[in-house]
Amino acid sequence: MTTATTARDALAAHATALDAADPLAPLRERFLLPEGVVYLDGNSLGALPAAVPPVLADAVRRQWGTDLIRSWNENAWWEAPLRVGDAVGRLIGAAPGQTVVGDSTSVQLFNALVAAARLRPGRPLLLTDPDHFPTDQYIADSVARLLGLEVRRVPARELPQFLAEQGDRVAVAGYTPVDYRTGELYDMAGTTRAAGRAGALMLWDLCHAAGALPVRLDEIGADLAVGCGYKYLSGGPGAPAFLYVAARHQAAFDHPLTGWNGHAEPFGMSGGYAPVEGIGRARIGTPPILSLLALEAALTAFDGVDMAEVRAKSLSLTAFLLHCADTLLDGHGFTAVTPRDPDRRGSQVALRHTDAYALVQALTARGVIGDMRAPDLLRFGVNALYVSHRDVLDAMRQLLDVVVTGEYRQDRFQLRTTVT
Ligand SMILES: *Cc1c(COP(=O)(O)O)cnc(C)c1O
């Protein structure tokens, strides 16, 4: 036997042993994954939870089709944004009454930034990360233009120091705990404390954290947070996003989009706006009920699941992915950009390669689905609820094969699709 075969056999045995000892393995049955697909893109669009199709069918046929407008009361449609908000809250360490669901992450970001700036009048700076997801940066720029503030792009790792030195000039800092490209994990608790000491507000974007790792918003004294419903929460394409406003900020929370659903008496039909007490004031207009109910059903995939176990398995998967990449792909032009220190790693691994785009296309054609982030990163997200160590090994073996055979050089894998 050659050394290469021995190494491959050892990896296979290792994957089998890790999967056999995985307490979360049975959760995979809560998802409807197609045969023969290795799905490592749950950080962009979570897989379909088995609980969703029957709930959606009922929502459409019975609730909409038969109960019609009575559903707002009889099927509790009216309460859905706050009810589903509390369900998300359980996964992000938020006690009930602080989380609302509706609209997109981009919209929630806008609302949260404006409201945060209004809570800290007289402070001229709005901070964001130069490596933050583009929409977060674009919206920070727009909010600053709108309110006459100045945006400073301070890298996440320099933020605590910046806050210590100039924090008294900062109204709000909008950051993510997990870099969407590299998967680097930052210290949420320490950064939140640094903002608090400076009297500034911290707005966390939890898109790559909610459902992926334990988040303890109340415990760390978080101010505000947003996040999407369609990544690790698996709420489906275009699932509504969430907004968390800590209870202590709610009375003064002045939402920029004063829609009638946030009014104290929405059916009083008065011509003047008076916000309802509590998180309900962060509601805007009529919510996307079908998507809300799909997200609510999707969240039941987390029933009885301990987020500490999710984190342990996620770290085991990403460590194993890095190990497979080291063992199998050495000498083929890949560099891992995700931190190896587990305390600094989210729930994904990114590999740098000059042919990242074509490699991801060729892998997808083989049923191994990851994604690519410009200009040169292959990104593999692991959702601990349905990804196995065997999946991770299969993905890295197929990647090796695609490289060694030169398959990715085919013309069809060079064509850019609209969505990468
Ligand atoms: C995915 C993601 C978004 C997406 O915003 P949408 O409005 O839902 O399209 C925003 N910010 C971050 C950090 C993300 O990872």
Image (spheres, rainbow, N blue to C red):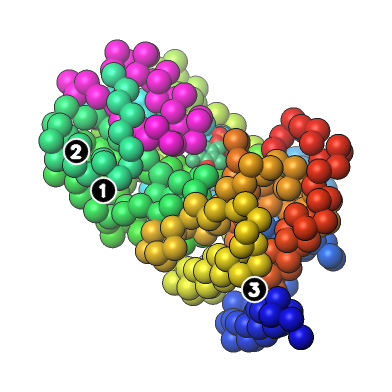
**What is the quadrant of residue 366 in the picture?**
bottom right
Residue 118 inside the magenta-drawn segment: no
Judged left or right of residue 293, residue 104 is left
Q: Secondary structure at mark 2?
A: helix
Q: Which mark is residue 191?
A: 1
Name the residue carrying label 2. Answer: 163
Q: Which residues are magenta?
A: 121-149
Find out whether the residues at labels 1 and 3 contact each other: C-beta distance under 8 Å. no
**What is the quadrant of residue 24 in the picture?**
bottom right
Look at the picture and state if 350 lies above or below 5.
above
Q: Amino acid at mark 2?
A: Leu
Q: Amino acid at mark 1?
A: Thr
Distance from the alpha carbon under mark 1 to that under mark 2: 9 Å
- Mark 2 vs mark 3: in front: 3
Lower position in the chain sequence, tag 2 or tag 3: 2
- Number of callouts: 3
Lower position in the chain sequence, tag 1 or tag 2: 2
Name the residue carrying label 3. Answer: 389
